[in-house]
Amino acid sequence: MINHPCSIGRTELATRYFPNIQPQNAWQKLRGLLAEDPDLRPLTELRRRTFLPIEVNKIYHSLGQP
């Protein structure tokens, strides 16, 4: 099991998955991937700009670690 120890900004996480594109575009791509997964879809509707460690672990579990 992957265990991410701290919160991370959504754009920072997105740029880890898509390092070769602009940060805003990376977030849009990551948000699209999250929306495709019913378990991760609620993460696209969060009003905050960070993911908690448990949410990061859930993303890593579904998408793999960047």
Image: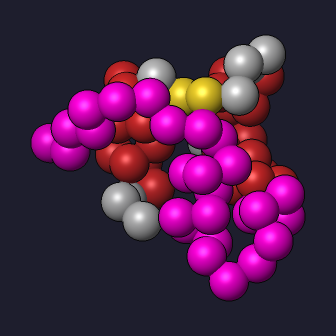
Is 59 located above or below residue 25 in the figure? above
**Residue 18 placement: quadrant:** bottom right
Residue placed most toward the observer, 62 or 52: 52
Is 41 located above or below residue 48 in the figure? below
Magenta-drawn segment = 1-26
Q: Is residue 12 something that shows in the picture? A: yes
Tell me the residue at 46%/56% (across/down): 63
The quarter of the image holding the C terminus is bottom left
The quarter of the image holding the N terminus is top left
Residue placed most toward the observer, 57 or 51: 51
Q: Is residue 1 left or right of residue 17?
A: left
Colouring method of the image: secondary structure
The question of residue 20 being in magenta is answered with yes
Q: Is residue 39 something that shows in the picture? A: no
Is 51 located above or below residue 24 in the figure? above
Give the image location of residue 9, x and y in percent. 60, 38
Tell me the residue at 74%/47% (across/down): 31
The question of residue 64 being in magenta is answered with no
Tell me the residue at 61%/76% (across/down): 19
Give the image location of residue 46, x and y in percent. 73, 19
